[in-house]
Image (cartoon, helix red, strand yellow):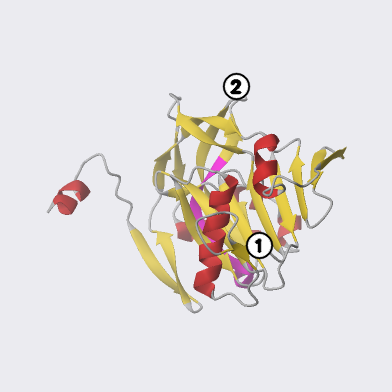
């Protein structure tokens, strides 16, 4: 009864949707144009000095070398672990080829090498790795698993929709291979607290309209692997400490999620997709 009452609350936005069968799976589709709010947040920046002991120097005995090269800072322990941070975007790529990389208990020191991990174990290990980074997981959800490169994908969510960004703002990609190799992709930037904003609303077309626009632009139906609504990350013009989150459609083409507006009006690019 409490759930039914909550669903009837006028403060909850109701969006009519369909589930359309595409290939061998169902796709969520919005039946009509919808209007969604924009949001603004203060952003938190993690210092590299706090990531080094978590990822490169967990035993407290490694010698860490630091090198600045082509707008990026590279940290290495001289062995199996390496972390690269983009000085422009804050994108982090951590790579390791250590055998002792599978968490077997709550203590971070409890690790061992396992030859083969089940799908359930891969997801569990991926989640534990995000915990090891020290990130807040309040609004982080599992978004999918890419079988082609054995990568678990997590996104931060706002008002029920994921934040999608090429620079991993609000997201994590955790790759674990049975060979012992692993790679984490995330960002030193994360959301802190919501701040007052202009509250600008954005009206998006129906999913079918977006799909037809892509076909008319020249994109192949076979290469459109998914269409969904998410929030794009945009630095506020007034302050670099604030980020604006703007709703948009995102389209999965060639394994990459792209803002649909960037795909339209570019016929030359479309013909190569």
Q: Is residue 207 visible?
A: yes
| Residue 127 drawn in magenta | no
Front one among 235 and 226: 235
Residue at label 1? Answer: 101
The span shown in magenta is 221-232
Q: Secondary structure at mark 2?
A: loop
SS for callout 1: loop
Q: Position of residue 157 (x, y in %)?
A: 46, 47
* Cα distance in 3D space between marks 2 and 1: 40 Å
Tell me if residue 118 comes above or below residue 2 in the rendering. Answer: below
* Residue mark closest to the camera, 2 vs 1: 1
What residue does disc 2 label?
A: 239
Q: Nearer the viewer, residue 22 or 57?
A: 57
Horizontal and vertical percent position of residue 51: 66, 41
User: Which x, y percent locates residue 110?
Assistant: 58, 60
Occupied quadrant, residue 146: bottom right
- Res. 209 in view: no
């Amino acid at each position: 009864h409490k759930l039914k009452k909550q669903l009837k609350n006028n403060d909850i936005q109701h969006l009519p949707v369909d589930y359309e069968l595409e290939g061998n799976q169902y796709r969520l589709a919005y039946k009509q144009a919808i209007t969604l709010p924009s949001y603004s947040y203060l952003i938190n920046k993690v210092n590299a000095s706090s990531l080094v002991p978590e990822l490169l120097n967990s035993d407290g005995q490694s010698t860490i070398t630091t090198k600045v090269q082509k707008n990026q800072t590279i940290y290495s322990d001289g062995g199996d672990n390496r972390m690269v941070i983009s000085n422009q975007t804050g994108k982090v790529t951590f790579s390791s080829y250590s055998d002792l990389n599978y968490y077997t208990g709550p203590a971070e020191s409890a690790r061992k090498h396992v030859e083969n991990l089940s799908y359930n174990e891969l997801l569990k290990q991926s989640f534990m790795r995000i915990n090891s980074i020290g990130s807040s997981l309040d609004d982080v959800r599992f978004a999918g698993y890419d079988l082609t490169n054995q990568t678990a994908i997590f996104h931060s969510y706002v008002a029920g929709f994921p934040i999608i960004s090429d620079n991993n703002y609000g997201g994590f990609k955790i790759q674990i291979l049975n060979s012992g190799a692993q790679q984490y992709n995330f960002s030193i930037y994360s959301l802190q607290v919501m701040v007052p904003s202009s509250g600008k609303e954005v009206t998006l077309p129906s999913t079918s309209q977006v799909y037809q626009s892509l076909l008319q632009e020249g994109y192949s139906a076979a290469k459109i692997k998914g269409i969904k609504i998410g929030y794009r990350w945009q630095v506020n013009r007034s302050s670099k400490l604030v980020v604006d989150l703007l709703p948009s459609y995102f389209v999965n083409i060639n394994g990459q999620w792209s803002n649909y507006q960037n795909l339209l009006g570019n016929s030359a690019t479309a013909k190569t997709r």
